[in-house]
Image (cartoon, grey):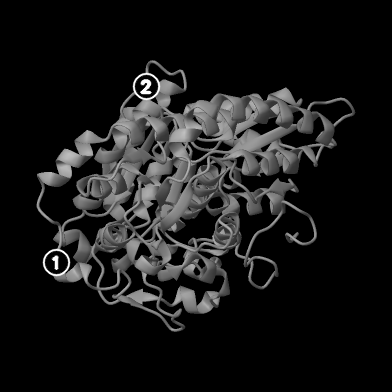
Amino acid sequence: MQSRHETPGFFVPGLQTKEKRMGLKTDKVVPGRENRVSACMAHGGCASGIGKQDKICLKNNEREFSQAGICQLLPTLGMLLTLPDTAVIVHGAIGCGSAGFGMNTSIKLHHLLRGNPNAKDSLWFTTNLDESDVVHGGEKRLEETILAVNEKYKPASIIVVQTCTPSIIGDDLVGVVEKLRPLIDTPLLYSHCEGFKTKVWATGYDVAFHAMIHGFIEKDKEGPPPRKAPRKAGERPLVNIINLASMGKPDELELERLLNAIGIDVVIGPNFADREKVRLMTQADLNVSVCPTHDDYLIEYLHEEYGIPFVLKDMPIGLENTRNWLLDIAGNFGLEQETLALIEREEAQARKAVERYLPALKGIRVFLSAGEFRAVVTGGLFQELGMEIVGLRSYHHDDFGTEFYARLVEAQEGKDFPIDIANFQPFELVNLLKKVKPDLFCGHVSDNAWAARLGFPCITIFRIFDYYVGYRGFYEVAKKAARNLKNFNFNKKLSQNVQEAYRSEWYDKSPFAYIKSDNPEPTVEPESLAA
């Protein structure tokens, strides 16, 4: 496996030796990210310290008290439900199956934005295991459900998602699926996404990729596609853009526009992609990640099995990161000069477009909250607009994000800020916000609700209708921030008319008071960093 030091733009942390490598093709059950990339879910300290912590000690961090979180089932469903005309069977109790309700509207809107006016509601089912099934096993009910769904609905594919209960009682998910594969023409996908197996919910991304690869490529009735023949002279390069479930069509169009402009054709998937497009992804000349945290498991498979090189380093949000992302891609095809010319034109236009907003944004103190990579790169975008980062909450931490914290501190001439690695934990977020008192909060909708209760102006760090990546994203985020800072009276009124969420004595404590660590960082109080 290539390392960052050998070839710029190519890096998979923790997967550098054959002994440590766990691959999509060979894994029957996806390993938790605690083991695969030493992911951390509980840490509080300052940004400058995150790269100095021993990653094994970070992995072992725990909380004495935990208020909220999600399990890997949710991101797994969030990705698999995007597949067109697919039926998802949640094997387990009815409560787990109900998770599909909350995602249905968003996924349908995604399809509408992608030009499908006839988009239907997500098709999902549950085996609804009861006490008798727990005693006698649920395999028969699962088998009957698969056959009934296939006969009645005739979906393009069927995905079986195994939850905690059938795993605890020992149901053989893979055995049932392999038994039924020869009996039906519909591709069968399966995923082990039991919440008790990992605390790092982002493992659900890997689980979804595992289901797609085995169902559409490795176990497909046509067999895996052959490796692509070498590209002919003069043939336009074909690049896979690995899209996120949390990536709207506007952002996909922006990235496609930029790559088409330098002579590169694009395939975007596997989210919202059908079987044929997923199989086509094995024929690309390069795989390009939009979010390294999201994509490394899939990219390693395509590299190992199909010899496809990859770019797995930056998220194209902000001017610097977009520049680096484009140049890493161009370097694979000798297109550096064309790309530099494009970058200069696009950057000049973007800087000119945001000039009107810069006076309102200069010196504004921002707090960010999101998945780690989106949070840190959006922080870089704000700094390019003259704003200051005063706090950051990441949903988890692994090696991909480490250097970006140092970049944010360096861009502020060494001025540090507190970070909270937390799988949500709103009690820590609210405590931290009260101490830091930012001028602007930027997070996902669920996070923004807590900041709005405190009266802070808020903007979303992601919405499926908006631009965030590339040069269009740079402009749109600047415009959105300036507009929300101009008028946030609703949030002010809200803060005056809601009860305090927590007891006053909680705010006297450190926001990290309940985090246990094998190698604690020296205590850093947010007030001192914000001063």
In the picture, the disc for residue 504 is 1
In the picture, the disc for residue 447 is none
Tell me the crowding category of disc 1: few under 14, some 14 to 19, or many 20 or more residues within 10 angstroms, Cα based. few
Q: Nearer the viewer, residue 45 or 299?
A: 45
In the picture, the disc for residue 119 is 2
Disc tally is 2
Can see residue 272? no
Q: Say which label, 1 or 2, has the lower sequence index.
A: 2
Residue at 53%, 76% (x, y): give it: 53
Q: Nearer the viewer, mark 1 or mark 2?
A: 1
Q: Nearer the viewer, residue 323 or 489?
A: 489
Amino acid identity at mark 1: Ser
Which secondary structure lies at badge 1?
Answer: helix
Left or right? Give the position of 523 relative to 468.
Answer: left
Left or right? Give the position of 120 relative to 396.
Answer: left
Amino acid identity at mark 2: Ala
Residue 43 screen position, x and y as percent: 41, 70
Tell me the crowding category of disc 2: few under 14, some 14 to 19, or many 20 or more residues within 10 angstroms, Cα based. some
Residue at 53%, 46% (x, y): give it: 383
Which secondary structure lies at badge 2?
Answer: loop
Residue 530 screen position, x and y as percent: 40, 61
Residue 205 screen position, x and y as percent: 47, 51
Residue 171 screen position, x and y as percent: 34, 62
Q: Nearer the viewer, residue 327 or 279?
A: 327
- View extreme (top): residue: 117
Quadrant location of the C terminus?
bottom left
